[in-house]
Image (cartoon, helix red, strand yellow):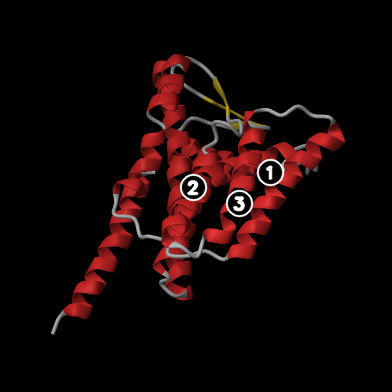
Amino acid sequence: MALLFAPLPRVSRLPRWPLAAAGAAAALVVIGYDAIHHAPLDPPKVGIIALGLGLAAASPFVHRPRVANPVAWTAALVGAPLLVWGVQALSKATVAGMTPMELFIRYALLAPMAAALSVLGRHPAIAGQVITYDTPHGPFALEVGVACSGIQAMALFGGVVLVFVLAEKPGWRRGLFWSAIGLAGVYVINVVRLVVLALVGSRWGADALEWVHANAGWAFFVAWSAAFAWMTMGRRKAGASEGAAP
């Protein structure tokens, strides 16, 4: 999100038909799923439908920069978190009793979190999406669900990086390099955030943990976004200055 504080590159145009197809597919999948399963429309589903239809409606005009730029950033900032919600909500396939998102939390987030707590001498144990570890006041159990796992923030950052690459057109090698740096960084920052939350809960209790999670957890993602924007924008400006030198 801190990328929004930087002079963001502008997207001059987007591919029409892929955008129209993706938008229409997103809306139709949700509508079709609800019709088949007789499920109610809740706010995230309405958001996916509205975003999908909006992208499809805007697709004939995305050759114009004034349309392409807001469409691209809206798709990244709104669509990425909704995509995470949609994958979790529509996924019924399980592996070892867990959905794909739950598997990611268990093995990609809780496992490194447990490793860090082990180094700190907290003797963690994982059961499903709950990690239990030692504190000065006795064992503390922390459940990491999809909503508080940071996956949506990671997806949001990934969407911003994607649009950044589309706007900058840095070439596939440089684009892959910066995408890898950005996504690896936001993943590490998310694990660090979870470890910090665990330590806050250990030291000050569940109320403090909830407060930090609700009011300060986003600061980790903002800090990394600002650092990533500084690195990429700084290199771009340095390259431009060298190219302009006599």
From this view, report whether residue 157 is shown above or below residue 126. below
From this view, report whether residue 206 is shown above or below residue 2. above
User: Horizontally, is 103 left or right of 10 in the view?
Assistant: right
Quarter holding the N terminus? top left
Image x and y of residue 184, in percent: 47, 55
* Circle 1 Cα neighbour tier, 10 Å, few/some/many (<14 / 14–19 / ≥20): few
Identify which residue, 139 or 100, lies in the foreground: 100
Give the secondary structure at mark 3. Answer: helix
Measure the alpha-carbon separation of dots 3 and 2: 14 Å
| Mark 3 or mark 2, whichever is nearer to me | 3
* Circle 2 Cα neighbour tier, 10 Å, few/some/many (<14 / 14–19 / ≥20): some
Measure the alpha-carbon separation of dots 1 and 2: 19 Å
User: Horizontally, is 210 left or right of 219 in the view?
Assistant: right
Residue 193, quarter of picture: top left
Image x and y of residue 126, in percent: 63, 33
Query: What amino acid does circle 2 point to?
Result: Thr
Residue 74 marker: 2
Quarter holding the C terminus? bottom left
User: Horizontally, is 226 left or right of 139 in the view?
Assistant: left
Residue placed at 54% from the left, 19% from the top?
Answer: 139
Query: What amino acid does circle 3 point to?
Result: Ala
Q: Which residue is mark 1?
A: 87
Identity of the residue furthest to the left in this view: 246
Measure the alpha-carbon separation of dots 3 and 1: 23 Å
Residue 57 marker: 3
Residue placed at 64% from the left, 46% from the top?
Answer: 53
Image x and y of residue 114, in percent: 54, 37
From this view, report whether residue 114 is shown above or below residue 165. above
User: Horizontally, is 36 left or right of 178 in the view?
Assistant: right
